[in-house]
Image (cartoon, helix red, strand yellow):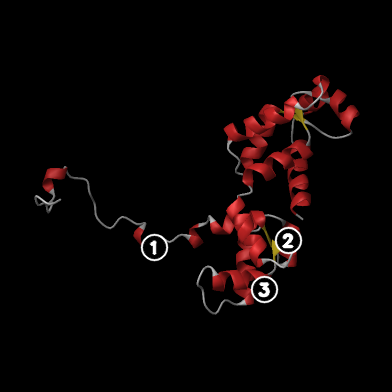
């Protein structure tokens, strides 16, 4: 599911490149049978999916060194999928997913319910609540329709504000602190 979603997403990005860029890559397309883009466009496309530009450039340069000279500097959708998977998959989150899934690379609603109750300490988690979270955080349309939470959706959920230990009510500023510091009473002692 993840590979299909990524290939489709990057194929859409590849098809949105300008015609002049497509003409420059005709030789590579005939050699590989696939669309390709240059490094700058690949970094931009990976950035659209949350990958840091510097890290993406380093991974793309590693891939370039393994390519023949005549296609160096051009990247296929498979190259982009490889870079995305290497840079976005966090091992600790992947191990959590594997621990709670039933020998699959995704969490079903039952698996996700178990995770929420055991790891997150939530009680009385309903099937509907799990589906609501999956709809909100899972990027793959196919997985959303099946009620599955893949590694990318699971990562999105765990890194979202819904999983913060910080109380959201404290985000708003309740005191104006516009005056100089000397205008405020500060409790001090020789011990602090």
Residue at the spot 65% in from the left edge and 58% down from the top edge: 138
Q: As drawn, which residue projects farthest toward the bottom?
A: 124
Q: As drawn, which residue projects farthest toward the left?
A: 190
Residue 73: percent from the left, percent from the top?
A: 74, 24
Which label's residue is closer to the chain start, 2 or 1? 2
- In this figure, which residue is indicated by the disc labeled 3? 110
- Please name whichever residue, 171 or 152, is drawn nearer the observer in this view of the structure: 152
Relative vertical location of residue 35 with respect to residue 121 in this rendering, above or below: above
Front of the two marks 2 and 3: 3
Choose top left, top right, bottom left or bottom right for residue 150.
bottom right
Q: Say which mark, if any, is on residue 144.
A: none
Evaluate if marks 2 and 3 touch, with contact meaning CB atoms under 8 Å apart: no
Q: Residues within 10 Å of mark 3 (few under 14, many from 20)?
A: some
Q: Residues within 10 Å of mark 2 (few under 14, many from 20)?
A: many
- In this figure, which residue is indicated by the disc labeled 1? 167
Choose top left, top right, bottom left or bottom right for residue 133.
bottom right
The residues tagged by marks 1 and 3 sit, at their Cα atoms, a distance apart of 28 Å
Kindly state the secondary structure of the residue where label 3 is placed: helix
- In this figure, which residue is indicated by the disc labeled 2? 143
Choose top left, top right, bottom left or bottom right for residue 134.
bottom right
């Amino acid at each position: 599911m993840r590979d299909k979603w990524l290939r489709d997403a990057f194929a859409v990005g590849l098809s949105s490149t300008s015609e002049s860029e497509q003409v420059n890559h005709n030789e590579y397309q005939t050699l590989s049978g696939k669309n390709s883009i240059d490094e700058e466009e690949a970094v931009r496309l990976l950035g659209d999916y949350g990958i840091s530009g510097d890290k993406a450039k380093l991974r793309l340069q590693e891939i370039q060194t393994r390519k023949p000279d005549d296609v160096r500097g051009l990247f296929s959708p498979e190259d982009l999928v490889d870079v995305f998977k290497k840079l976005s998959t966090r091992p600790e989150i992947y191990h959590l997913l594997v621990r709670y899934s039933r020998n699959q690379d995704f969490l079903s609603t039952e698996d996700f319910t178990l995770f929420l109750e055991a790891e997150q300490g939530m009680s009385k988690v309903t099937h509907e609540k799990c589906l609501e979270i999956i709809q909100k955080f899972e990027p793959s349309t196919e997985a959303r329709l099946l009620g599955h939470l893949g590694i990318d959706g699971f990562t999105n959920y765990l890194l979202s504000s819904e999983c913060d230990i910080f109380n959201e009510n404290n985000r708003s500023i309740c005191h104006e602190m516009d005056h100089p510091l000397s205008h405020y009473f500060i409790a001090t002692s020789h011990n602090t």
